[in-house]
Image: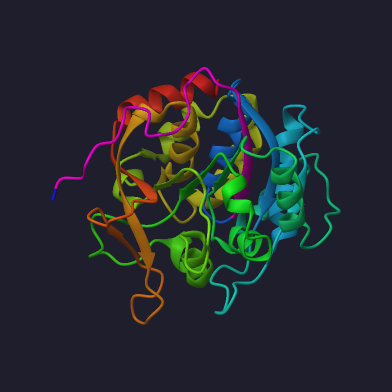
Amino acid sequence: MQPCRIRRDGGMTLPDDREKILLDTDIGTDIDDALALGYLLSEPRCELLGVTSVTGEPERRAEMVSAICRNVGREDVPIHAGCPEALLIPMKQTRAQQAGALGDWDRQRDFEPNSAVEFMRRTIRSNVGEVTLLAIGPMTNVALLFATDPQIPAMLKRLVLMCGRFFDSTDGVEWNASGDPHATAIVYGAGCRAGPPRHVSFGLDVTLQCTMDADTCRKKFSARVLEPVLDFAEVWFARSDRITFHDPLAAACIFQPDLCTYAEGRVTVSLDAPTMGRTIFDSDSGEKPHAVASEVNAEAFFEHYFAVVK
């Protein structure tokens, strides 16, 4: 089955619009979260309203966010630590390994525990219809936000996720979706009466095409915003010889949506073993509340990313 195409901008934003962004991240496990943050701080069309951290050691993850922001003089960006546990299962990632590379980087060190969800709720209610919520980690914070304030999804401008695998499920589940599968189900609409006006996901089907080897990364990570990121990346390179730009692709497509093409349908989430956390995409659904990226121009993505992050 060939995925259907929707309009060229993916139903997202026109490139010349200034976008109010909330970023929810599990920075500190995979390095691509830090690269996505570096992109948002560099993109002149981005008004970064705040960053929230999620999963194990959220305060340490918040410190990493602070180090990147302070290195480019962005102490104005609010940073809040979120939920350290999954809703109903044990948390799969209990440590923020890359926080071990924080060293002497200037940063805030005292974060109030579990303040993220209330911060997200206040920010969205203060900017109704204007906020893009970009979630690039397990969905715990976002699910708690939607469950505790059911009006919030409809108050967003759009919800953008790096989550799932939609056209080839033979290789198992995606990390963010399976990190808190019950939260993932909530975020895709299980039990919710109202969804976001636009709900767009970037899954492994497309993000796995955006990879760069370690030596090339070391050469290209020359921008000031990536100075602490390069230190964090060395922790990642101890276990992998390349970086896949999962999260930066989701961030970039907010501003340059035609880097991908999209299909519309409905996503459901398996909550049964052994497929718990698997995302199932149905393009033949009568209602089509979800858009998913189906193809990517990887060369154009990298050209765009390093034109912004320079």
- Residue 19 lies in the magenta-colored region: yes
Closer to us: 176 or 9: 9
In this rendering, position of residue 250 left or right of residue 90: left
Question: Residue 103: percent from the left, percent from the top?
Answer: 74, 47
Please say if 68 is above or below 173. Answer: above
Question: Residue 255: percent from the left, percent from the top?
Answer: 48, 27
Look at 60% across and 23% down and name the residue there.
18
Write down the quadrant of residue 108 in the picture. top right
Closer to us: 77 or 282: 282
Image quadrant where one finds the C terminus: top right
Look at 52% across and 69% down and name the residue there.
180
Secondary structure, magenta segment, majority class: loop
Viewer can see residue 270 = yes
Write down the quadrant of residue 128 in the picture. top right
Closer to us: 273 or 31: 273
Look at 24% across and 37% down and name the residue there.
5
**How many discs appear?**
0
In this rendering, position of residue 23 left or right of residue 69: left
Question: Furthest-bottom residue in view?
Answer: 273
Viewer can see residue 27 = no
Over which residues does the magenta segment extend? 2-28
Question: Residue 140: percent from the left, percent from the top?
Answer: 59, 64
Please say if 165 is above or below 295. Answer: below
